[in-house]
Image (cartoon, rainbow, N blue to C red):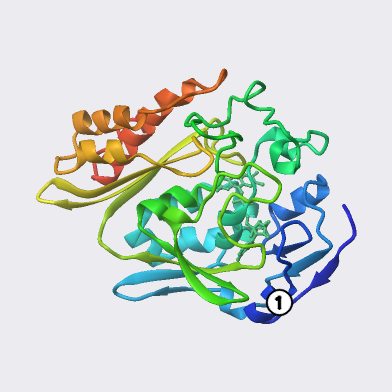
C-alpha cells in the first residue's frame, strides 16, 4: 500500500475542504471494506485519506410520516435491523441484510455502498491497463465476461454496478443529499449512477470533492421486494437482482417500478416490464410476462447469456414476493 496522510475531520465542511477537485489524490474513508482492498491492490493510491468516522451528522435513521432519512454513515447491519426499514421497505432490509457477511455489514456503510468501485477482475488487477485505469481497451468485451453486463449497448466498458442497495433505492424513488464546496444539493437515486469509461470518471455522478450525507426514501406505502440470484449465499455479489415497488389498489398494480441490478454499468430501469404489469393483478402469469419483458434489449457478451433467463426469474419472484404470494421456490 502506498503511504498516505490520514485526516479525521469533525464536520462535513472540514471533510470536503480536504478533498481535491480531481479523482485519485484524496479519498473519503467510511467503513473501509472496499477502499482498503483497492489500496492494497494498488488500484487506489491516494495521498490523503479523509476518515468520516468522527463526522456526527453522518449517523442515524430518522422517520417522519412522509419519509425515512438514512444518514450516509449508517451501517448495512443497522439498516437491515431497523424496525421502520423492515416495516416500510422490506426490499431495502432484505438487500442490506444479504450483503457480504456480518463483518462486511457491521463495517460497510450506506455511503460506501453507493460509491463502491466495480468488481470487474480486469479493473481490480493492478497489471491490466483497462479503460478505467487510463488504458484504451475494455478487456472484458472479448475476454472473461461471465459476470459482466448483458445490457451492453452504447457502453465502452461493460462492468456491472456493484451496489445491491442501488436498484432498491431507485425503485423506491429515493434521493441522495449531497454536500460539496458549493453547498448542498439533492440527486434522485435514478440519476446518481453513471457508466464510466475513463480514469477520470466514477460509477456515480458526484464531483471528486462532494460527499453523500444521507438518502431519503418516501414512505409512499408501496409494496416492495428485492430478489437476488446468487451463486453463493454470502461473501459474494449477486449474479442478477430485481427490485420492484408498486401501489396495490383493489388488487391492481399502479406506479410500477422494476429495476435490475448486476446486469448493466448502471442499475437498469426495466420500464417496458413495468408497463406490462401496470393496472393488472399480480399473478404468476402477469409476473412471468413482466419478467420476460424485462429481458427486452439484452445484448449479452460471449459468456453471460445465462443472465437473461435469470432476469426473467428474478423479476417474477420479486413481484410475487412484493404482492404477498406464497414463495413456492422456498422449500
Ligand atoms: C466479500 C464481499 C461481499 C460483498 N457483497 C456485496 C453485495 O452483495 N452487495 C453490495 O452491494 N455490496 C457488497 N459488498 C460491498 C460492500 O457493500 C461495500 O464494500 C461496502 O458497502 C462499502 O462501504 P464502506 O463504508 O466500507 O465503504 P469504504 O470502503 O469506506 O468506501 C468505498 C468508497 O465509497 C466512498 N465513500 C464512502 N462514504 C462516502 C460518502 N459518504 N460520500 C461519498 N463517497 C463515499 C469512498 O471514498 C470509497 O471510494 C461486498 C463486499 C465484500 C468484501
129 versus 182 height, above or below: above
Q: Nearer the viewer, residue 72 or 45?
A: 45
Q: Residues within 10 Å of mark 1 (few under 14, many from 20)?
A: few
At which x and y percent is residue 8? 76, 75
**Residue 40 left/right relative to 22:** right
**Residue wearing tag 1:** 17
The residue positioned 59% from the left and 36% from the top of the image is 159
At which x and y percent is residue 30? 67, 64
State which quadrant residue 292 falls in. top left
Q: Is mark 1 within 8 Å of ligand 1?
A: no
At which x and y percent is residue 234? 58, 40
State which quadrant residue 20 falls in. bottom right
Q: Can I make out residue 229 in this image?
A: no
Q: Nearer the viewer, residue 270 or 280?
A: 270
Seen as rendered, the residue at the extreme top is 302
100 versus 76 height, above or below: above
Q: In this figure, what is the number of numbered marks?
A: 1
12 versus 100 height, above or below: below
Quadrant location of the C terminus in the rendered image: top left
The residue positioned 14% from the left and 40% from the top of the image is 280
State which quadrant residue 282 falls in. top left
**Residue 308 left/right relative to 230:** left
The residue positioned 47% from the left and 31% from the top of the image is 151
**Residue 105 left/right relative to 227:** right
Q: Can I make out residue 204 in this image?
A: yes
**Residue 26 left/right relative to 138:** right
Seen as rendered, the residue at the extreme right is 3
Q: Secondary structure at mark 1?
A: helix
The residue positioned 50% from the left and 47% from the top of the image is 164
Quadrant in which ligand 1 is drawn? bottom right
Amino acid at each position: 500500500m502506498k503511504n498516505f496522510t490520514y485526516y479525521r475531520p469533525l464536520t462535513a465542511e472540514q471533510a470536503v475542504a480536504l478533498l481535491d477537485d480531481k479523482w485519485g489524490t484524496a479519498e473519503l474513508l467510511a467503513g473501509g471494506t472496499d477502499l482498503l482492498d483497492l489500496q492494497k491492490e494498488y488500484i487506489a493510491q491516494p495521498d490523503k485519506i479523509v476518515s468520516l468516522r468522527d463526522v456526527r451528522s453522518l449517523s442515524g435513521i430518522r422517520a417522519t410520516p412522509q419519509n425515512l432519512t438514512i444518514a450516509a454513515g449508517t451501517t448495512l447491519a443497522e439498516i437491515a435491523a431497523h424496525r421502520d426499514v423492515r416495516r416500510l421497505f422490506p426490499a431495502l432490509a432484505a438487500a442490506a441484510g444479504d450483503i457480504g457477511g456480518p463483518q462486511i455489514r457491521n463495517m460497510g456503510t450506506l455511503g460506501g455502498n453507493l460509491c463502491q468501485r466495480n468488481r470487474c477482475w480486469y479493473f481490480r488487477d493492478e497489471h491490466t491497463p483497462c479503460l478505467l485505469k487510463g488504458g484504451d481497451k475494455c478487456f472484458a468485451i472479448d475476454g472473461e465476461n461471465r459476470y459482466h453486463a448483458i445490457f451492453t449497448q452504447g457502453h465502452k466498458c461493460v462492468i456491472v454496478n456493484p451496489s445491491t442497495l442501488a436498484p432498491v433505492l431507485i425503485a423506491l424513488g429515493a434521493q441522495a443529499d449531497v454536500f460539496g464546496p458549493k453547498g448542498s444539493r439533492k440527486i434522485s437515486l435514478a440519476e446518481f449512477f453513471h457508466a464510466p469509461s475513463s480514469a477520470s470518471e466514477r460509477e456515480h455522478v458526484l464531483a471528486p470533492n462532494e460527499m453523500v450525507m444521507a438518502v431519503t426514501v418516501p414512505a409512499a406505502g408501496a409494496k416492495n421486494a428485492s430478489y437476488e440470484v446468487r451463486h453463493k449465499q454470502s461473501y459474494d455479489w449477486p449474479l442478477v437482482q430485481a427490485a420492484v415497488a408498486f401501489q396495490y389498489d383493489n388488487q391492481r398494480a399502479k406506479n410500477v417500478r422494476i429495476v435490475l441490478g448486476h446486469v448493466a454499468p448502471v442499475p437498469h430501469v426495466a420500464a417496458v416490464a413495468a408497463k406490462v404489469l401496470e393496472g393488472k393483478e399480480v399473478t404468476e402469469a402477469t409476473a412471468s410476462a413482466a419478467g420476460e419483458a424485462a429481458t427486452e434489449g439484452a445484448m449479452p457478451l460471449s459468456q453471460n447469456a445465462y443472465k437473461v433467463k435469470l432476469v426473467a426469474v428474478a423479476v417474477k419472484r420479486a413481484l410475487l414476493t412484493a404482492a404477498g404470494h406464497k414463495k413456492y421456490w422456498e422449500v
